Image (tube, rainbow, N blue to C red):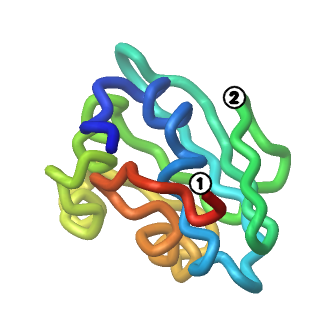
Amino acid sequence: MAGPVSSVKEYFETLPDRFRKEAAKGVTAVFQFELSGHGGGLYFAAVDGEQLTVTEGSHVSPTVTLKMAASEYVKMANGTLNGELAFLTGKLHVGGDLAMAVKMRSLFPPGHVGRRADR
């Protein structure tokens, strides 16, 4: 089992291992990440049922857009910063479908890199 991520790049490289196919049944969504500051960047994760595609860059029509500092996102990805608290304190800005943004927690559990569901 892998440990916590140390960068945004590492997070997106490990996102397929974090993805929970069982939670994605019937879900079609694009999650756009706009992460600012040192080590940040633009990424999007497209979920189509049990399939996940992770791409560096911007999507033309994301379902959800998340904006925050890269360093804070790494904390959230590792489970040391609560996503709801980050949102309420203004560290995380969410655009688009808020219900789908909440669903992300079950699709990509924070702090968890383990065995892929298809292995």
In front: label 1 or label 2: 2
Which of the 4 quarters of the picture holds residue 33? top right
Residue visible at 33% across and 57% down in the picture = 110
Which of the 4 quarters of the picture holds residue 49? bottom right
Residue visible at 59% across and 54% down in the picture = 65
Q: Residue furthest front?
A: 119
In the picture, measured across the screen, residue 51 lies left or right of residue 105, that is right
Residue 9 location, x and y as percent? Answer: 49, 24
In the picture, measured across the screen, residue 66 lies left or right of residue 32, that is left
Residue 54 location, x and y as percent? Answer: 70, 41
Give the mark, 1 or 2, whose residue is nearer the N terminus.
2
Q: Residue furthest left?
A: 80
Residue 86 location, x and y as percent? Answer: 24, 57
Question: What residue sits right under mark 2 in the picture?
Answer: 56
Relative to 106, residue 56 above or below: above
Question: What residue sits right under mark 1 in the picture?
Answer: 65
Residue visible at 50% across and 68% down in the picture = 104
Relative to 78, residue 97 above or below: below
Residue type at mark 2?
Glu
Looking at the rendered structure, the secondary structure element under dot 2 is strand
Quadrant for the C terminus in the image: bottom right
Quadrant for the N terminus in the image: top left
Identify which residue, 46 or 5, lies in the foreground.
5
The residues bearing labels 1 and 2 have C-alpha atoms spaced at a distance of: 14 Å
